[in-house]
Image (tube, rainbow, N blue to C red):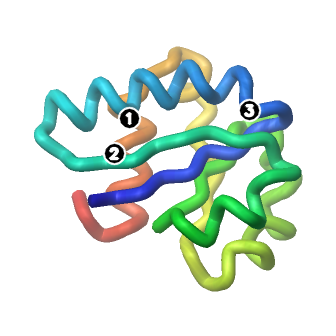
Amino acid sequence: MVKILLVCSAGMSTSFIVNKMKESATAKGIEAEIWAVADAEAAENIKKADIMMLGPQVRFLESKMKGVAGGKPVAVIDMVAYGSMNGEKVLEQALKLLGKE
């Protein structure tokens, strides 16, 4: 089971990519828990996640979130994949960072 936390300004736009990522994980037979929250909720949610992915619109928070993540991987979602709502590419990015590709 891989647990992927997505973070954006309000947790709204990223919820669309969450659904696409879940569809891709199911199609690939990957057991995954994927959810999105607003940046203000990231600290409490990282505790149950394996990785934190930031929406491109909050990339300026990357260094702050790395401090919050307690050594867990933190990365900015690829802007093209995010903009095109390519859940498969975002899932692949997360799995690669976790060494589970």
Q: Quadrant of the N terminus?
A: bottom left
Which residue carries the number 2 mark?
A: 92
Would you call the spot at circle 1 few (<14 residues within 10 Å), some (14-19), or many (20 or more)? some
SS for dot 2: helix
SS for dot 1: helix
Does 59 appear above or below 86?
below
x, y (%) of residue 14? 64, 29
Which residue carries the number 1 mark?
A: 89
Which of discs 1 and 3 lies nearer the camera? The answer is 3
- Do the numbered discs 1 and 3 sit on residues whose CB atoms are within 8 Å? no
Q: Which sits in the foreground, 22 or 48? A: 48
Three-letter code for the amino acid on which mark 2 is drawn: Glu
User: Of marks 3 and 2, which one's residue comes earlier in the chain?
Assistant: 3
- Do the numbered discs 1 and 2 sit on residues whose CB atoms are within 8 Å? yes
Would you call the spot at circle 2 few (<14 residues within 10 Å), some (14-19), or many (20 or more)? some
For the view shown, which residue lies furthest in the bottom direction? 71
Does 76 appear above or below 89?
below
**Residue at 55% in and 70% down:** 73
**Label 1, label 2: how far apart the Cα atoms are:** 5 Å
**Label 3, label 2: how far apart the Cα atoms are:** 21 Å
Which of discs 3 and 2 lies nearer the camera? The answer is 3
x, y (%) of residue 37? 71, 42
Three-letter code for the amino acid on which mark 1 is drawn: Lys
Left of 70 or right of it: where is 51?
A: left
Three-letter code for the amino acid on which mark 3 is drawn: Gly
**Residue at 60% in and 26% down:** 15
**Residue at 19% in and 46% down:** 30
Q: Which mark, residue 11?
A: 3
Does 1 appear above or below 71?
above
